[in-house]
Image (cartoon, rainbow, N blue to C red):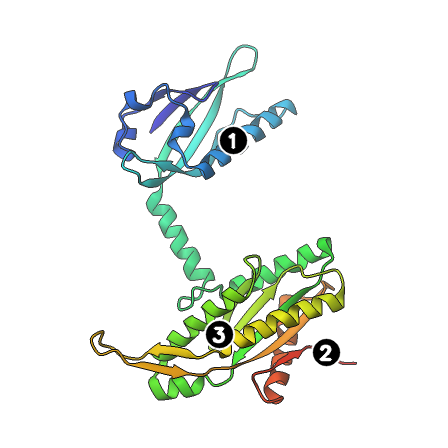
Amino acid sequence: MIWKVDRDLKITYISPADEKFRGYKADEVIGHHVFEMFTPESINIISEKIKQRLEAQQKGMNTEEFVTYEIQHRCKDGRLIWGEIISKPEYNASGEIIGFHGITREITERKAMQDRVQQLAFYDSLTKLPNRILLSERLSYMLAEMKRIQKYSALFFLDLDNFKSLNDTYGHSIGDLLLCQVAQRLQKCVREVDTVARFGGDEFVVILNTLHEDNQVSVEQAHRIAEKILQSVSALYVLNVSHNKSEEKLVEHKCTASIGVLVFKSAEKTPDDLLKQADAAMYKAKEAGKNKISFYEAPF
């Protein structure tokens, strides 16, 4: 789709391909503001691109190159499609921008494929939680941020105590149902800025970002959340073990957890260091009788 807009971002030309992609004839959009084509998020992206170009122009930088970005477009029937926009400004004799022109290609299928690849690469296929790869990336990012913010964070390593008995009795498909419910319960116990990840098997990891500047206050905050998780995970599970919808069979199962907690500040640690220390604390909770919380204590 080829298009042109004036300095006020009013559409002055659009090729017939727009009718194929979005369902609009040219006379339905010419004269209209280009923002009518996009979602609010897309409008923010375009506005930021224009702002960056103007700032670069004021600094004497070259702004005559094509700029490429991906945004969502509105269709006449209400659908949203993805488009890759390649745009360039038009100037008058005084060097002022008098409009833009460019090409838009639909990339909806490509975006869907990219999202699918991202999901497979970084998320657990069963629980939809971040997997170990994404967990490691988020830990690395958090460690870098902590040097700037100077607040404590916490890492929980959680292992289900009596998960194996459920698998042995009813099979792995029922165990999978329980793991999904555990994942949902964990997510409800933490903030949106925190991370809940599946480490593998019946092990989960929770990252609590930016707690407090004071160590003791941070420890108390982490302990409250760990207690909340312990109570939530240990609440009764009701699982549907039937394979036939007309003959529903429900099974009740009690499943507790052992939680290892590491409260830390960035001190040239690596993600592996953090995970090993939280894991060591979790094994202490196991040894203490399970269904407990154990904080990591550095050896003397």
* Quarter assignment of residue 273: bottom right
Instruction: Identify the secondary structure beneath mark 2.
Output: loop
Q: Residues within 10 Å of mark 3 (few under 14, many from 20)?
A: few
Q: Which mark is residue 297?
A: 2
- Above or below, 29 against 157 in this view is above
Q: Nearer the viewer, residue 232 or 241?
A: 232
Instruction: Identify the secondary structure beneath mark 3.
Output: strand
* Residue at figure coordinates x 60%, y 74% from the top left: 227
Q: Quadrant of the N terminus?
A: top left
- Above or below, 101 against 205 in this view is above
Q: Which mark is residue 47?
A: 1
> Mark 2: which amino acid?
Glu
* Residue at figure coordinates x 48%, y 78% from the top left: 235
Q: Position of residue 163 (x, y in %)?
A: 45, 83
Q: Earlier in the sequence, mark 1 or mark 2?
A: 1
User: Which of pointers 1 and 3 indicates the residue nearer the eye?
Assistant: 1
> Mark 1: which amino acid?
Ser
- Above or below, 141 against 169 in this view is above
> Mark 3: which amino acid?
Gly
Q: Position of residue 111 (x, y in %)?
A: 38, 47
Q: Which mark is residue 200?
A: 3
Furthest residue in direction left, as rendered: 246
